[in-house]
Structure formats: C-alpha cells, structure tokens
C-alpha cells in the first residue's frame, strides 16, 4: 500500500489588497473569520482610518461580518480599497 498524504481542507486564502497609486499588500485570512479584521490590518499597515476606506470584491462592497468563505474567495483574488472622498 502506497503512502498517501491526506488532502487537507482549505482553511485560509491569500488575497491581494490594492489601492490606487499605492503598493499592493498580500494578506492571508481564514475562510471563516469576519473580513473586518482584514480591513483593520490593511488600514493599520498603510496608516489609514478604516472608517474612510471602502473595500470591494468583484465590484461589491464588503460588509464587516462577511467572511472570505461567504464570498467564495480563492488564493490570488483581489480586494480593492477605495478612499471615501467628501463632496464639496
């Protein structure tokens, strides 16, 4: 009988968070953890106020309690970070 390594269930994904005119950051997240933690980690790294940044995936705003699993994210998917701008 050949030795086989059992296939493990995937529990994490690595996603790219990109922002216009800024560098990209790759973050590894658990599929079942609320994406609010990813938002906070990104804003902390780049020095932004999380309340002033809008995150989207596939053109749809990411809600704080959604998870990568809810959105069926895969390794290499891109989350876009947009600065909310105040109108004049």
Image (cartoon, grey):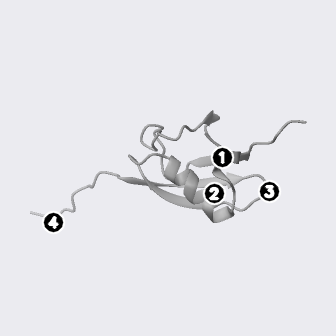
Identify the residue at horizontal 29%, vertical 51% (top origin). 9
Identify the residue at horizontal 57%, vertical 38% (top origin). 62
What whole-number distance in Å separates the C-alpha atoms at marks 3 and 1? 20 Å
- For disc 2, the marked residue is 43
Foreground tag (4 vs 3): 3
Q: Which class describes the residues within 10 Å of circle 3: few (<14), some (14-19), or many (20+)?
A: few
Q: How many marks?
A: 4
Residue 45 in the figure: left or right of residue 70? right
What whole-number distance in Å separates the C-alpha atoms at marks 3 and 2? 15 Å
Percent of width and height locating residue 50 = 64, 50
Residue farthest along the left direction in this orientation:
1
CB contact under 8 Å: marks 3 and 1: no
The local secondary structure at tag 2 comes to: helix
Residue farthest along the right direction in this orientation:
88
What whole-number distance in Å separates the C-alpha atoms at marks 4 and 3? 50 Å
- For disc 1, the marked residue is 51
Q: Earlier in the sequence, mark 4 or mark 3?
A: 4
The local secondary structure at tag 4 comes to: loop
- For disc 4, the marked residue is 3
């Amino acid at each position: 009988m050949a030795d086989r390594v059992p296939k493990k269930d995937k529990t994490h994904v690595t996603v790219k968070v990109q922002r216009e005119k800024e560098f990209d950051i790759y973050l590894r997240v658990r599929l079942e953890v609320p994406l609010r933690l990813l938002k906070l980690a990104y804003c902390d790294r780049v020095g932004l106020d999380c309340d002033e940044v809008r995150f989207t995936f596939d053109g749809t705003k990411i809600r704080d309690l959604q998870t990568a699993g809810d959105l069926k994210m895969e390794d290499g998917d891109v989350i876009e970070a947009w600065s909310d701008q105040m109108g004049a």
